[in-house]
Image (cartoon, rainbow, N blue to C red):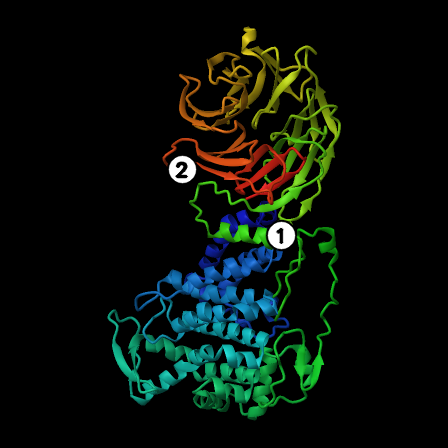
């Protein structure tokens, strides 16, 4: 369901409403001591053990978080690297940011472990160039803060030594992965401080031992701080209770399991340059080898490399004997360097190849959740990856607070929809906002997809064209209850939005009084209302032949013809606007006229009914009026006047009104309180919108605008 929603809702809504919550949920997967326990070998699943490039050491939280990580990585497959670099990494930086106090809380403790595991997943999917570009940021904002917590002698973990051990092992794995990706030379250049910090605790424990200090039980309430002289003649404060945790983490086994792989990753000479206390760590590693196994040192080191899988299979098969002085691996930048020979991995697909599934459905790229054994995996270059204007708008949206309720119009062109040969008369988004309908003067109705595509200059083709109309189409809408489309050119057509097949046509009862206004009822109603020049509203239910109801609104010919129909959100009342500026409210359930009053001095152009018994109407008299309680005693709550041009098109977004004029000006007005947000007006630039604005519609969930023009082009702007 989450994957389906991620593709359906688009990148901005997915990042605001789904990714943010999944990132928080991922942290919760590691909360509590039980989630930080290592899985026994008998309980390990095959996904953790088969063909690993290095040993994973899974904890129980990994099993809980696996579906969450799968969904997060699927979003990266859909929308590309920006999801990783602009949303996931900043959240990771927030999780590992320094905290005050001498102890962590359980949430922060879980956040550190979750941050390391999520960072590892991100590293796998980053391209070589992107990884090198953001490596300093990863080092400063992720690795070093995590290691500062891990090696701190004064900050204790709520779950004790077990949580610190799990964090140490996961951090070691993450650093090893980065070393594999960038190669030994880049490690010495960029990760020198990181490796020094990681190995520094071995020196601290040695100094504590030399001074005769002993760890104290963690159960003591008051911290006992002592001063320890460091190698550089400085003084470090050490909490004796935390010292017990460090002793359980930085054992001779940890020294052995860390020193041997890193000595192969960056070479013996490299580790001597990077790690100042390498002799101490090597001595501890030798102590572990002597106590565990009587094998020779070289054999042990070779077994260690083969078990942890630090080198990938191609390199191991090409090296007859492992020597510490040989630095054979240059990272993943295109190939593996072995001596003076470049060896290309055999399993790399030829350039330009594409999976069958990607060819069949480019929007749902091939995604495998089993990437635990992968050193590097390329994200597919799909058509829906974020770039250009889409990327700029997405970056802005993920930085906006979720509590932000105002509609902000930045005039960013995202998509163009070409196909109509006549002026656009009406546009209507479907309920899910993944498609929209457009009716035109060229006597066609077209169904368009609203998925992000390209960099903002792309021109979309219609998914379906309905060409059964004989005249200009002035209304198009959807019967949401039955998922059918209603369009009108004087004759009402009801048709299937999937196949385009006509289901029913309804003509005017009297040819002398043609249909001039149409409205569809909200769900669960399955009917529509039509009105003409005879001031009669007729209700049609597509499931029944003929008319369902017929209500006479006015007998005075001076009222004129009905220009516009609007339905209340609950479907209980209907509002009719006349060419004379008169407005009538009808109770749909009883057929009684609730109220009628002269609202404007000119022709009614458009009306919208909102929750809270609110009605908005615009007229040729250049006024936009908000009416409060129109069914009781209609009075204008707000009256906005447009000096230059009448507001001929508008739509509602929450408590705001988004308007458009023939002068190509987009205005934003307050629906309830003008003092809350000052009204703003933006002139559409010719670069983003050409022609004359004829109609507009707001996509409330995606916060986007659909603008139709007289040249037959619909544009999507943010």
Task: Where is residue 342? Give x, y as percent.
Answer: 70, 81
10 Å crowding of disc 1: few (<14), some (14-19), many (20+): some
Can you say whether 508 is above or below 344 in the image? above
Residue at the disc numbered 1:
455
Instruction: Tell me, yes or no, if residue 61 can be seen here.
Output: yes
Q: Is residue 465 left or right of residue 147?
A: right
Whether residue 295 appears in this view of the structure is no
Q: Position of residue 624 (x, y in %)?
A: 47, 26
Task: Name the quadrant of the C terminus.
Answer: top right
Secondary structure of the residue carrying numbered label 1:
loop
Q: Nearer the viewer, mark 1 or mark 2?
A: 2
The CA span between labels 1 and 2 is 32 Å
Sequence-wise, which precedes: disc 1 or disc 2?
1
Residue 678, disc: 2
Residue 98 screen position, x and y as percent: 37, 66
* Residues packed near mark 2 inside 10 Å, few (<14), some (14 to 19) or many (20 plus): few
What is the secondary structure assignment of the residue under circle 2?
A: loop
**Which of the 4 image quadrants contains residue 432?**
top right
């Amino acid at each position: 369901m989450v994957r389906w929603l991620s593709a359906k809702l688009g990148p901005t809504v997915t990042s605001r409403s789904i990714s943010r919550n999944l990132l928080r949920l991922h942290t919760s997967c590691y909360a509590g001591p039980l989630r930080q326990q290592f899985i026994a070998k008998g309980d390990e699943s095959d996904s953790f053990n088969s063909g690993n490039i290095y040993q994973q050491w899974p904890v129980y939280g990994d099993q809980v978080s696996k579906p969450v990580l799968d969904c997060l990585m699927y979003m990266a497959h859909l929308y590309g690297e920006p999801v990783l670099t602009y949303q996931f990494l900043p959240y990771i930086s927030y999780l590992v940011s320094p905290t005050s106090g001498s102890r962590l809380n359980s949430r922060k403790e879980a956040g550190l472990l979750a941050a390391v595991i999520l960072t590892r997943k991100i590293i796998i999917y980053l391209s070589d160039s992107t990884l090198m570009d953001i490596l300093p940021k990863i080092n400063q904002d992720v690795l070093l803060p995590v290691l500062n917590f891990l090696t701190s002698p004064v900050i204790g973990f709520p779950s004790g030594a077990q949580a610190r051990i799990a964090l140490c092992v996961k951090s070691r794995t993450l650093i090893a992965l980065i070393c594999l990706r960038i190669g030994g030379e880049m490690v010495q250049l960029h990760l020198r401080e990181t490796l020094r910090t990681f190995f520094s605790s071995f020196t601290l424990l040695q100094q504590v031992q030399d001074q005769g200090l002993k760890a104290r039980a963690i159960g003591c309430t008051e911290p006992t701080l002592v001063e320890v002289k460091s190698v550089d003649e400085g003084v470090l404060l050490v909490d004796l209770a935390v010292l017990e945790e460090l002793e359980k983490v930085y054992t001779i086994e940890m020294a052995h399991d860390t020193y041997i792989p890193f000595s192969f990753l960056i070479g013996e000479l490299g580790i001597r340059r990077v790690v100042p206390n390498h002799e101490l760590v090597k001595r501890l590693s030798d102590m572990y080898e002597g106590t565990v196994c009587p094998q020779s040192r070289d054999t042990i080191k070779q077994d260690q490399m083969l078990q942890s899988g630090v080198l990938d299979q191609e390199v191991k098969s090409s090296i007859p004997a492992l020597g510490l002085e040989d630095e054979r691996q240059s990272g993943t930048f295109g190939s593996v360097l072995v001596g003076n020979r470049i060896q290309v991995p055999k399993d790399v697909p030829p350039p330009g190849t594409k999976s069958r599934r990607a060819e069949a459905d480019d929007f749902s790229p091939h995604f495998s959740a089993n990437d635990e054994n992968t050193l590097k995996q390329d994200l597919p270059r799909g058509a829906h990856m974020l770039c250009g204007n889409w990327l700029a708008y997405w970056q802005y949206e993920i930085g906006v607070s979720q509590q932000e309720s105002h509609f902000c119009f930045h005039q960013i062109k995202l998509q163009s929809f070409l196909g109509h040969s006549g002026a656009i008369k009406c546009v209507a988004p479907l309920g899910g906002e993944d498609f929209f309908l457009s009716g035109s003067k060229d006597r066609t109705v077209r169904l368009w997809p609203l998925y992000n595509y390209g960099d903002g200059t792309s021109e979309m083709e219609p998914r379906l064209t309905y060409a059964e109309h004989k005249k200009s189409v002035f209304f198009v809408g959807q019967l949401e209850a039955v998922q059918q489309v209603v369009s009108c050119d004087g004759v009402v057509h009801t048709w299937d939005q999937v196949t385009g097949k006509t289901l029913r046509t309804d003509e005017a009862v009297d040819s002398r009084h043609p249909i001039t206004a149409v409205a569809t009822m909200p769900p669960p109603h399955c009917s529509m209302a039509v009105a003409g020049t005879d001031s009669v509203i007729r209700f049609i239910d597509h499931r029944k032949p003929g008319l369902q109801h017929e209500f006479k609104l006015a007998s005075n010919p001076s009222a004129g013809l009905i220009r516009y129909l609007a339905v209340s959100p609950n479907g209980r009342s209907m509002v009719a606007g006349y060419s004379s500026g008169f407005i009538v409210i009808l109770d749909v359930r009883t057929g009684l006229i609730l109220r009628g009053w002269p609202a404007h001095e000119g022709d009614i152009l458009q009306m919208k009914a909102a929750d809270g018994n609110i009605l908005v109407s615009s007229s040729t008299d250049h006024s936009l009026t908000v009416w409060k309680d129109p069914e009781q005693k209609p009075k204008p709550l707000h009256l906005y006047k447009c000096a230059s041009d009448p507001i001929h098109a508008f739509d509602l977004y929450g408590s705001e009104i988004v308007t458009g004029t023939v002068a190509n000006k987009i205005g934003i007005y307050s629906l309830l309180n003008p003092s809350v947000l000052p009204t703003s007006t933006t002139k559409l630039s010719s670069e983003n919108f050409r022609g004359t604005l004829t109609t507009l519609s707001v996509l409330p969930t995606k916060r986007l605008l659909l603008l139709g023009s007289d040249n037959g082009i619909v544009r999507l702007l943010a």
